[in-house]
Image: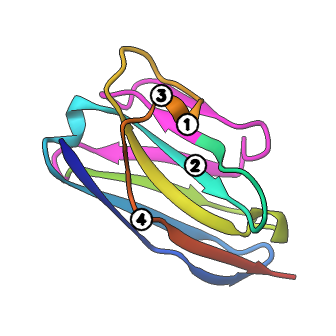
Amino acid sequence: QVQLVESGGGLVQAGGSLRLSCAASGRSSSSYNMGWFRQPPGKEREFVAATSRSGGSTEYADSVKGRFTISRDNAKNTVYLQLNSLTPEDTAVYYCAADQGVKISTTRYAYDYWGQGTRVTVSS
């Protein structure tokens, strides 16, 4: 199995940027498709972005397309989420997750392992 630890969250003004990191330990992260989800205050956890094992395929939620970029460095067992042009609607706890499935999934129930989350707060 794999353990995931997110970092990089914080408070940022609208229009700003952050880069989130997800460090994997235990089994190599290259064994998994990796995803980012977020949970805004009082709302359900929602899909943000995902990448295949090689990083060659990615998927994004419509709400973040063109603003967020998922990437991975398998040599460092780390997955990243670059957040640009942030708005207050992006305020949430962001979670990294690992999926053993064959294809990228956008549904939270496909993911087998989760990190503890990192909080992103965007002020207006």
Q: Quadrant of residue 116?
A: bottom left
Disc 1 marks a residue whose amino acid type is: Arg
Q: CA distance from mark 1 to mark 3?
A: 5 Å
Q: CA distance from mark 2 to mark 1?
A: 8 Å
Residue 76 sits above or below residue 7 on the image: above
Q: CA distance from mark 4 to mark 2?
A: 12 Å
Residue 28 sits above or below residue 92 on the image: above
Residue under numbered circle 3? 110
As drawn, which residue projects farthest toward the left? 26
Residue under numbered circle 4? 116
SS at circle 1 = helix
Q: Are marks 2 and 3 in contact (CB under 8 Å)?
A: no
With 104 as the anchor, is 63 left or right in this view? right
Q: Are marks 1 and 3 in contact (CB under 8 Å)?
A: yes
SS at circle 3 = helix
Q: Residues within 10 Å of mark 2 (few under 14, many from 20)?
A: many
Q: CA distance from mark 4 to mark 1?
A: 15 Å
Q: Which residues are magenta?
A: 49-76
The earlier-in-sequence mark between 2 and 1 is 2
Image disc number at residue 32? none
Residue under numbered circle 1? 108
The one of 50 and 112 positioned closer to us in this rendering = 112
Check residue 104 for magenta coloring: no
Which mark lies nearer to you, 2 or 1? 1
Check residue 56 for magenta coloring: yes
Residue under numbered circle 2? 37
- Residue at figure coordinates x 68%, y 66% from the top left: 92
Q: Are marks 2 and 1 in contact (CB under 8 Å)?
A: yes
With 40 as the anchor, is 3 left or right in this view? left
